[in-house]
Amino acid sequence: MFSLKKACCAAFLALALALPAHAADFSAKDLKSMSVFLSNFTELGFMDVDAAAFLDEKAPGDMIRFGIWHNYVNNFKSRIKRCRDKGCPWGSLTIDGKFVQESLKRYFDCELKNLPTVEDSDPPYHFDGRLYHFEGADGEATYYAAVKKAARTADGLVRMSGTVYNAEDEKDVLGTFTAVARPHEWNGKKTWALLELKTTVKE
């Protein structure tokens, strides 16, 4: 079932990329919102994303990592808690699994019903039936996306392009990117669900 769904998604995306783009009259405010949307991926080091593979429940490492670290970076005080068990073998921090599901719904329009434990990851993410346990990490450079151009394709998707830059120095440009997203609504607000992100790092 999943392989068929994945194949259809890939075929749909290939068709969307082949279709001509039309002027969309996106405002500067729209481009800024798109930049914030894509920065939620690049700030975590996800520079290349293929949603069909990213959301593969048979290999859930990337999507669980995204759901946890998105909240670690953006909602630390409200959603990240210390594990109540001293010396917890699975990590000193926890997050409720519902927030991981929420993030996947918000940024991919993905309904993840069953939350898996991800052992083959560094660090691993243990799910105890309600909470994910993990260890925190900081110190790496953070990169944001700046959308310079955006247009709708004939079938209603949005194609974006721009640059990826160091959050602490906008002149430090990592490279350029292209992205394709599908408009969707989350929590009563219009946003996008990412289908593909490709970054070309400058030499």
Image (cartoon, rainbow, N blue to C red):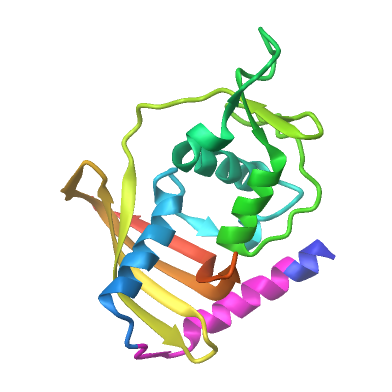
Q: Is residue 18 magenta?
A: yes
Task: Please give left or right for residue 22 compared with residue 167 in the image.
Answer: right
Furthest residue toward top: 87
In the image, what residue occupies the spot 71% across and 75% down?
A: 8
Q: Position of residue 182 (x, y in %)?
A: 54, 75
Is residue 188 shown above or below 117?
A: below
Q: Is residue 101 visible?
A: yes
Q: Is residue 47 visible?
A: no
Q: Position of residue 90 (x, y in %)?
A: 68, 19
Q: Main secondary structure of the magenta part?
A: helix
The range drawn in magenta is: 6-24
Q: Quadrant of residue 166?
A: top left
Is residue 94 shown above or below 160?
A: above
Q: Position of residue 79 (x, y in %)?
A: 57, 36
Q: Quadrant of residue 27?
A: bottom left
Q: Is residue 30 magenta?
A: no
Q: How many marks?
A: 0
In the image, what residue occupies the spot 34% across and 91% down?
A: 23
Task: Please give left or right for residue 128 compared with residue 104 in the image.
Answer: right
In the image, what residue occupies the spot 71% across and 70% down?
A: 7
Quadrant placement of the N terminus: bottom right
Is residue 89 shown above or below 180?
A: above
Q: Position of residue 86 (x, y in %)?
A: 67, 8
Decide which of 170, 174 is in the foreground and name it: 170
Decide which of 78, 104 is in the foreground and name it: 78
Furthest residue toward right: 1
Task: Please give left or right for residue 128 compared with residue 147 in the image.
Answer: right
Q: Quadrant of residue 132?
A: top right
In the image, what residue occupies the spot 49% across and 84% down?
A: 18
